Image (tube, rainbow, N blue to C red):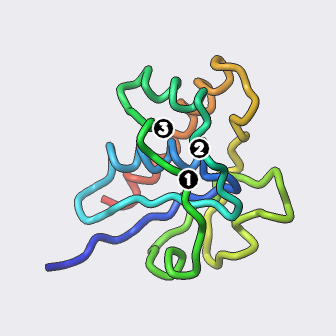
Amino acid sequence: MLSSKKILFVCVENAGRSQMAEAFFRKYSPKGYEPISAGTKPSGTINPVAVQAMKEVGIDLGSQTPKILTNEIIADSVLSVNMGCMDKTECPAVFMRDSVDWNIEDPKGKSIDKVREIRDYIEQKVRELCKTLE
């Protein structure tokens, strides 16, 4: 049995952007691919505003938990997508080679309207990525 090719989505806290990207990739990914998300300094919980914004589009992040970025996760991935770095000292791109940076604004502390904009942009970027993998 062939294993899936893993696409890694990373940000610092793994509480918003990378979780949304993982969920959208799970929804849209071509056969043979699997998403994973992680962070260099994961928070204790998923951003509740991100959870709310994703519920609005039929995706429940409520059972997800932030995960720590490990060398094993990086090595097991065929592509790493850095969501953007606001915290330069904990920036995931520092730890990864051959990564793509989407430079997406962190939804932490933002209004629901702003988080919806971020969510929609992440969905667009994930759909574009999926087209390149088919």
Question: 67 or 30: nearer the eye?
Answer: 67
Where residue 66 is drawn, which disc sits there? Answer: 1
Q: Which residue is mark 3?
A: 123
Q: Residue at x 75, y 73 (%)?
A: 94
Q: Residue at x 28, y 55 (%)?
A: 30
Q: Vertically, is 2 above or below 6?
A: below
Identify the secondary structure beneath mark 2.
Answer: loop
Q: Position of residue 63 (x, y in %)?
A: 41, 42
Question: 60 or 9: nearer the eye?
Answer: 60
Dot in front, 2 or 3: 2
Instruction: Say what amino acid the circle numbered 1 marks.
Output: Pro
Residue lying furthest left in this view? 1
Asked if residue 66 lies left or right of residue 57, the reply is right
Asked if residue 52 lies left or right of residue 27, the reply is right
Instruction: Say what amino acid the circle numbered 3 marks.
Output: Glu
Q: Which residue is mark 2?
A: 45
Identify the secondary structure beneath mark 1.
Answer: loop
Dot 2, crowdedness within 10 Å: few (<14), some or many (≥20)?
some
Q: Position of residue 56 (x, y in %)?
A: 44, 20
